[in-house]
Each structure stands twice: as structure tokens, then as C-alpha cells.
Amino acid sequence: MGEDRHGQTAIVFTSARTADDEEGYSRAARAMEALAAEQPGFRGMESARGADGIGITVSYWANEESAVAWRAHADHRAIREQGRERWYDWYRVTVARVERGYSWTGG
Amino acid sequence: MGEDRHGQTAIVFTSARTADDEEGYSRAARAMEALAAEQPGFRGMESARGADGIGITVSYWANEESAVAWRAHADHRAIREQGRERWYDWYRVTVARVERGYSWTGG
């Protein structure tokens, strides 16, 4: 939690789920998270999705190159196509460079 | 959805809710969202919280100065104290500068 993410590339993926295929979606989401974690330059991921179907996943990468390489990964591309066909009403992606961060943990 | 956020400051707020005071928390969260939206330089906000209590809110600001001013806002400070006392087990904040983005909407 206290990682220094300065200089990392953060990818914010915001999406709205369709009502379809929760099982297939969950399986794919878990597989993609595991695959991302194996990629060079992966530095972390956090995710939340509410009952309204809106979800936000933020992944952190050592640098721009590793983030771009993940985007181009063949399995990631293939799952994105399924995502557009079945799982998402819309999504947006924001790429940002981390400047600083801080954290708090209750006592 | 197709906003150009290049150069904006993104604040990623990731948090774990306690099980306490859902009503008070929801009320405060709505009030803070409305107050943020009135601040100079506010450019948008998106939020998701799952059943596990983990939430991510990303707010976007015209520049570093407006993001810092929001952090220092008296009402925001006061609510943060309540958050640490009652609503959060932990949280972390990541400040990043947006480089690019894209979006997709289903047909």
C-alpha cells in the first residue's frame, strides 16, 4: 500500500457491463488479471465494480513501454474483442503518469 | 465520454470501507461529489464500489493547482477526518498527469 509509484504509468479502465454472461465475464476477468501480473513491468492492479455495473480497474506499469506491450498482447487483444461483443456497453481508457501518492491505514 | 483529458490531473482514491454507518457514509459521499463538482478546475469524477467494500473514485482536474486546492478545501478536510474515524479501514491516493485516452461505445 505504501508503494512509491512515482514515474509509473497508470491505466484507468472504466466500463459499464451488459447484463449478459456474468460467468464468462468473471472467468475472463480473472484470467486477464493473472496474465497481466505475469507481464514485464507490471506493478499492480486494483479493481471495483458496483451493483450498477460500472467498474473501474487501475493497472500500474513500470513505464509507457510495458503498458503499451500489454495492450498489444495477443490474448489481451482477443479478450477485448469478446468484451466489445458481449460484456461491455461502453468503456474508456485513460493513460496517466504517476506523480505522487500517499496512503493511510486505520489503527 | 470522449472528453480529451490530456494534461489534466487525475486523482485515484482507492479505499476499503468499514462495515459501519452506511447511511452517513453515503450521504457524505454524495455531498462531497456535489461539492467537488462546484470547484474551479473540476473536470469529472467516476466511482465504483464492490460488495467487498473496495472502492475506486477517480476525479479529474484542469491542473495540479485545482487538485491541490480541492484537497485543502475546509469541508473536504473535515469529511476526511470523519472518514478516517468511521468509514475507512484504509485508503490510498495516487496523483497522475493524464497523457491520453480513448473510449468505445457499443453499437
Image (cartoon, coloured by chain):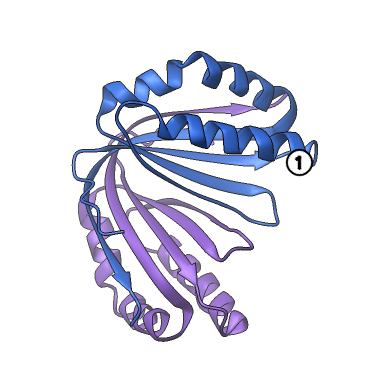
Chain colours: A purple, B blue
Question: Can you say whether B75 is above or below A22 in the image?
Answer: above
The amino acid at mark 1 is Glu
Drawn side of residue B36 relative to residue B32, left or right = left
Number of dots carrying numbers: 1
Say whether residue A3 is visible.
Answer: no
Q: Quadrant of residue A68?
A: bottom left
- Which type of secondary structure does the marked residue at label 1 adopt? helix
> Where does the image place residue B70, in percent across and percent down from the top left?
41, 23
The quarter in which the N terminus of chain A is drawn is: top right
> Where does the image place residue A81, in percent across and percent down from the top left?
34, 83
- Which residue is painted at 57% across and 79% down in the image? A19
The quarter in which the C terminus of chain A is drawn is: top right
- Which residue is painted at 79% across and 36% down in the image? B21
Drawn side of residue B65 relative to residue A26, left or right = left
Question: Can you say whether A99 is above or below A14 in the image?
Answer: above
- Which residue is painted at 27% across and 26% down in the image? B64
Drawn side of residue B13 relative to residue B31, left or right = left
Chain letter for the residue marked with disc 1 in the picture = B
Q: Which residue is mark 1?
A: B22
Question: Can you say whether A26 is above or below B91 in the image?
Answer: below
Question: Can you say whether B28 is above or below A16 in the image?
Answer: above
